């Protein structure tokens, strides 16, 4: 057995009121960074259960756009980790997010599609992107990301900062070092470009660890409406075009790619 942890409605309401203006006015898109978000013992329990890269069947990404490890569902969550993630999907926490962001009717994801445990080894990265915008099973619109970082004594020289880029993809406007007990919430739109694009430079025995939670609503404001899409990777200034082209192929439906290639062949044959 373990000592359970439950969010306090009163404390979270106060925290939301203190930070709602920061969230809504932040550049380059709505976000807030909260340090010392949880009691340290809570995340220490998660760290104690966090699997090593070779301990469980992680979903491994080894592409030009991402090199990372991620959980699929909640099968290998530890007992306390499973309990804590349930609290992140609780009504108390959803009310906090609604009060903080002004987004009503938020729904958590019990399937942890794309979320859950994330881990990046030395040399890993995640290119700048905007996230997929619909939950494949629930058919809901993705509205918020929340990330809790689990990395004690993380040095800036290790890299791995979360970069938030401007809409025109000219430069990162904000960088968030993934230090222990730092919690980040940001809006999920087609222009919420983020990532950590440079290879991680941590010691070989360290990894960049985090808990990722995604939140949804039934519909979104008309000004944010877009067609359903997968991850939209972006090319940074100076990055090779070929890499961006390969990224597009991973997120574009095959029928559209086939049509584009057919048109391209016709143009070249003239």
Image: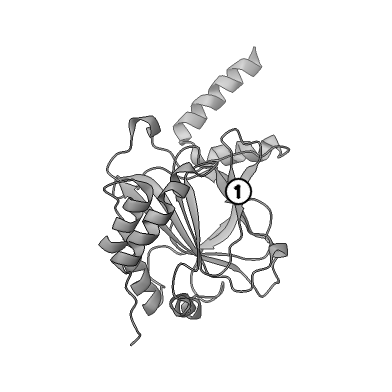
* Image colouring: one colour
Q: Is residue 114 left or right of residue 27?
A: left
In the image as oriented, which residue stretches furthest toward the bottom? 1
Q: Position of residue 203 (x, y in %)?
A: 71, 71
Q: Which residue in the protein does label 1 denote?
A: 174
Q: Position of residue 190 (x, y in %)?
A: 47, 37
Q: Is residue 76 above or below residue 239?
A: below
Residue placed at 35% from the left, 84% from the top?
3
Callout 1: SS: strand
* Residue at the image point whose x is 70% and y is 37% from the top: 237
Where residue 206 appears, as percent x and y from the top left, is 64, 72
Q: Looking at the rendering, which quadrant does residue 9 occupy?
A: bottom left
Q: Quadrant of the N terminus?
A: bottom left
Q: Look at the picture and state if 30 lies above or below 48.
A: above
Residue 167 in sight here: yes
Of residues 21 and 243, the one drawn nearer to the viewer in this rendering: 21
x 44%, y 40%: residue: 189
- Which residue is located at x 67 percent, y 65 percent? 122
- Binning the other alpha carbons within 10 Å of mark 1 as few (below 14), some (14 to 19) or many (20 upward) gives some
**Viewed as shown, does residue 186 lie left or right of 167?**
left
Q: Is residue 112 visible?
A: no
Task: Say whether residue 199 is left or right of residue 150.
Answer: right
């Amino acid at each position: 057995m373990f000592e359970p942890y439950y969010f306090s409605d009163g404390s979270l309401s106060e925290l939301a009121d203190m930070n709602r203006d920061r969230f809504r006015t932040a550049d380059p898109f709505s976000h807030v960074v909260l340090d010392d978000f949880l009691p340290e013992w809570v995340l220490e329990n998660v760290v104690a259960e966090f699997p090593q890269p070779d301990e469980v069947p992680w979903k491994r990404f080894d592409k030009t756009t991402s090199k990372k490890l991620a959980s699929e569902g909640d099968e290998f969550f530890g007992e306390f980790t499973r309990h804590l993630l349930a609290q992140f999907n609780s009504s108390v926490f959803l009310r906090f997010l609604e009060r903080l962001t002004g987004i009503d009717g938020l729904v958590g994801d019990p399937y942890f599609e794309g979320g859950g445990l994330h881990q990046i080894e030395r040399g890993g990265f995640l290119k700048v992107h905007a996230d997929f915008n619909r939950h494949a099973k629930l058919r809901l619109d993705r509205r918020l990301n929340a990330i809790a970082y689990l990395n004690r004594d993380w040095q800036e020289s290790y890299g791995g900062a979360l970069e938030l880029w401007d809409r025109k993809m000219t430069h990162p406007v904000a960088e968030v070092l993934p230090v222990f007990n730092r919690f980040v919430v940001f809006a999920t739109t087609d222009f919420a470009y983020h990532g950590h694009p440079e290879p991680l430079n941590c010691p070989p025995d360290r990894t960049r660890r985090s808990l990722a939670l995604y939140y949804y609503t039934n519909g979104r404001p008309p000004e944010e409406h877009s067609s359903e899409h997968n991850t939209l990777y972006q090319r940074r200034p100076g990055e090779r075009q070929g890499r961006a082209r390969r990224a597009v192929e991973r997120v574009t439906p095959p029928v559209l790619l086939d049509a584009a290639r057919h048109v391209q062949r016709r143009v070249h044959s003239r």
